[in-house]
Amino acid sequence: MIKIALDAMGGDFAPKEQVEGAMLAIKNIDDIEITLYGRKEEIEKYLKNSERINIVDCRDVIPMGEHNPVHAIRSMTDSSMVKAFRATADKEHDVVVTCGPTQAVVVGAHVIIHRMEGFRRPALAPIIPSLTTGQTVILDCGANLEVRPDQLVQQAQYAVVYSKEVLGKENPSVGLLNIGTEEGKGRDFENECYKALQESGLNFYGNVETKDILEPPTDILISDGFTTNMVVKCMEGTAKSMGKMLKQNLMRGFFGKIGALLSKKNLDRFKKQINPDEVAGGMIFGLKMPLIKAHGSSQSYAVFCALRTAASVVRKDVNNKVQQALLSEKPLGE
């Protein structure tokens, strides 16, 4: 049985959506057991089915707008996030899931769970939809605003293992996000990273422009956290606004409404394809224990998707495979 810790108080709509997402996961995934960390009396308001679901009472909550994440992690020891992380670090659980504030999650990951041996700089790596590859791993989405080329290569190597084991990609390719496709484009940083990736032994494609973010020629897209976080947020905001614009135009006039009705199945498929809930955040690569960071605005289905991903990461033994490769000094992509 895969044991999952869920920070039930982390997120904009906690604990309702977290509890409902947990019940949905239990209904659809047979080999998991979930422990909800949070205020017991609030969790029990929404918990209609406690099959394979436990509760650990926590009195504190790290707020979504926390401005001092280091102080919060160190001082709020009875918070749902800290207790869930601590229990996972102590191997009471196989993986932990949270929708809590990103910077607090990153600090907690470093301070409580710790980096796996040999991994230099953990990275936040969500999955985004792709018209060409189905799903694309994109990193680092904000865990590190700055990174060295050797650290970026190691993150790419982890992403290759993840893509193989969790996403089923046979020979994942890596693209470096840049302002042009030609070699030599970008800042000194991009040029140094390009060279390092070329020499890494990975299936390195080269530079990829951000205009191809949803139709990339690669399975993995990588850059520093500042750049990639900006790209992902722009993509998500554009997709959301485009969906609204499409709906507004389809609902204008009698024939537009008839057309929308006739196209309902296709429109629902389109909505699902661009829905960030389908990918539900991402894994933080490079920790001793797996951690899935879901969107702060996650609702029940997104929480379910994050729990499904968490179970898959454990089932495929991703962390141990990466750790063994690091200790043996083999390239992670092999």
Image (cartoon, helix red, strand yellow):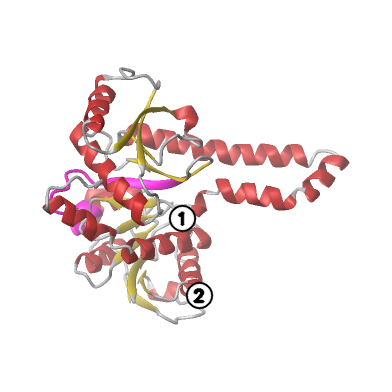
Q: In this view, does 82 lie to the left or right of 299?
A: left
Find out whether residue 120 is within the magenta segment: yes
Q: Is residue 66 left or right of residue 254?
A: left
In the image, residue 34 sits, relative to residue 156, either above or below, namely below
Which residue has dot 1 on it? 12
Count of marks overlaid on the render: 2
Residue sitting at x 36%, y 76%: 55
Residue sitting at x 34%, y 66%: 315
N-terminal-most mark, 2 or 1: 1
Check disc 1 and give the amino acid type. Answer: Asp
Q: Where is residue 217 in the image (x, y as percent from the top left)?
A: 44, 34
Q: Comparing marks 2 and 1, which lies closer to the viewer?
A: 2
Which residue has dot 2 on it? 27
Residue 115 visible in the shown view:
no
Q: Give the range drawn in magenta.
A: 108-128
Q: Quadrant of residue 82?
A: bottom left
Residue sitting at x 40%, y 22%: 181
- Between 136 and 243, the one nearer to me in the picture: 136
- Between 217 and 193, the one nearer to me in the picture: 217
